[in-house]
Amino acid sequence: MKRKTIMVSIVALTLLLLASMLATSEAGWFNKPKPEFYGFDSKIVFGSSTIVSVDDSDAPELVIIESYPSIVDCNITIDDKVYYYPDDFDFVASHHMELNPVTGNALVRSEGTFVFKMAGRPTLSFWGMARVTGWHSLPDGSLLAPENVLSQGEFELTGTKKLSQVEGFGLGDGNFVAPDYANMYIHQLGFIKGWSR
């Protein structure tokens, strides 16, 4: 009799445990939650720039340059989905550089907007700040040793997709591309939220 009671108790506890696990899984406690942030990775190659203003009133210590670079190539990866310029999106950017020609150091503020060619025309805007080193130019404006020019900074993203607000952040770096060093390669790596497929 004692053995039968113990056996019934074990079976009852096992059934209770199974029912509890089923209820928990139905409630979604064991389901993997959807991530809030996804990976963001952009690779941009800027070509020649249209310079719209140069303020050298504080030269030689400070020269301020406003420019609009041409876009040679760009691709963006969001949550393992790759978008290519110009097929998948339009892109415009601008740069504001505060350069000390004596030291070759500069601060650059970059702004740009990606407008995607999909339903609802989602947009992503970025705002970034970078510290540039090695920017030494000759009197004709060409760079002396462009292979030594490096930039490092951070960026923020804002935008909309469908009815969602999109935001993100990350780090970026850049350098001129060999062999002729005429184009600047920028790589931005970070996170984005509000952008679902």
Image (cartoon, rainbow, N blue to C red):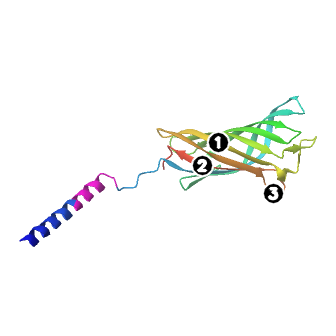
Q: Secondary structure at mark 3?
A: loop
Instruction: Give amino acid for label 3.
Output: Ala
Return the x and y of residue 69 as percentages of the image width and height. 75, 42
Instruction: Give amino acid for label 2.
Output: Gly
Q: CA distance from mark 1 to mark 3?
A: 25 Å
Residue range of the region highlighted in magenta in the rendering: 17-29
Identify the residue at image location x=10%, y=72%: 3
Identify the residue at image location x=17%, y=67%: 10
First of labels 1, 3 by sequence position: 1
Q: CA distance from mark 1 to mark 2?
A: 9 Å
Instruction: Give amino acid for label 1.
Output: Phe
Q: Is residue 165 magenta?
A: no
Q: Is residue 22 magenta?
A: yes
Q: Which residue is mark 1?
A: 155
Q: Is residue 121 visible?
A: no
Question: Is the C-beta separation of discs 1 and 2 under 8 Å?
Answer: yes
Which residue appears farthest toward the top when viewing the image? 57
Q: Which residue is mark 2?
A: 190
